[in-house]
Amino acid sequence: MTPYECYQNYLAFKNHFSKEKFDYFKCHGKSRASLDAFHKRKDRYFFEKMSRQKSDDEIKNFFLANFVECDNSQKIWIREIINCGDQYHDKWSKRTQSLNYNFKQEVSTLFSEFEFKKVFECKLGNHPILLKQHMINNVSIETMVILDSIFNYVSKFDSNLLDPVWETYSMRIKKYKPFINIDVRSYKQILKEILTND
């Protein structure tokens, strides 16, 4: 990946996670930014350094990790990625490398503390238990995505929660989902075993 292509990839991730209609995959990880605009950027050195040091897949994973890991993927800027990028990437890598294990641990704890139906209960004006647990880092974004793949709860929450806090999380879950390769049957089985044992 050239420095310019690296920059385009960054913009494609930024647009994907901040614009509802933009799709990273449909745009093949590129954006319309001109080469001239790239050469005028003061932070150009960052993309030049990345393109030298990382493979194409490493660059993509680095940007994905940063947009998923930050507090608000719609508001992250390149300066934050320059300052915190490696730290965000390390946290994301640890979670994704232990996806099955983390899912088991998180849902075991979640459903031992809360009744299954209550976790997904969504009443107008009140954040569901699942969202609250995610907000205090007891449930990872990956587990949120996996649970949505099983139960399709996001659309239900979208209908009942009309607040900007949920909108931010909802968008991040939907935008992250296509990047995670989920064997739904396998995770359903894991969940079934956990719920049966409880």
Image: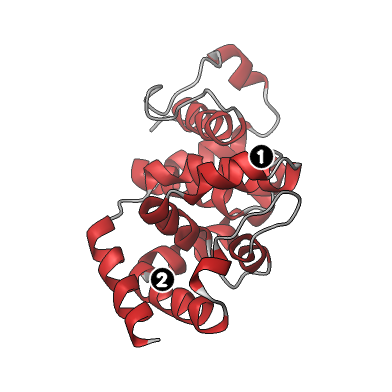
Residue kind at label 2, given as amino acid type: Phe
Q: Quadrant of residue 139?
A: bottom right
Binning the other alpha carbons within 10 Å of mark 2 as few (below 14), some (14 to 19) or many (20 upward) gives many
Residue plotted at (65% across, 56% down): 84
Of labels 2 and 1, earlier in sequence is 1
Q: Residue at x 30, y 54 (%)?
A: 182
Q: Is residue 78 above or below residue 134?
A: above
Residue 39 seen in render: yes
Q: Under tag 1, what secondary structure?
A: helix
Q: Which residue is mark 2?
A: 103
Above or below 56: residue 124: below
Element at badge 2? Answer: helix
Which residue, given by chain and number where applicable, does mark 1 sit on?
Answer: 78
- Give coordinates of residue 192: x percent, y percent: 31, 73
Percent of width and height locating residue 89: 52, 58
Q: CA distance from mark 2 to mark 1?
A: 31 Å
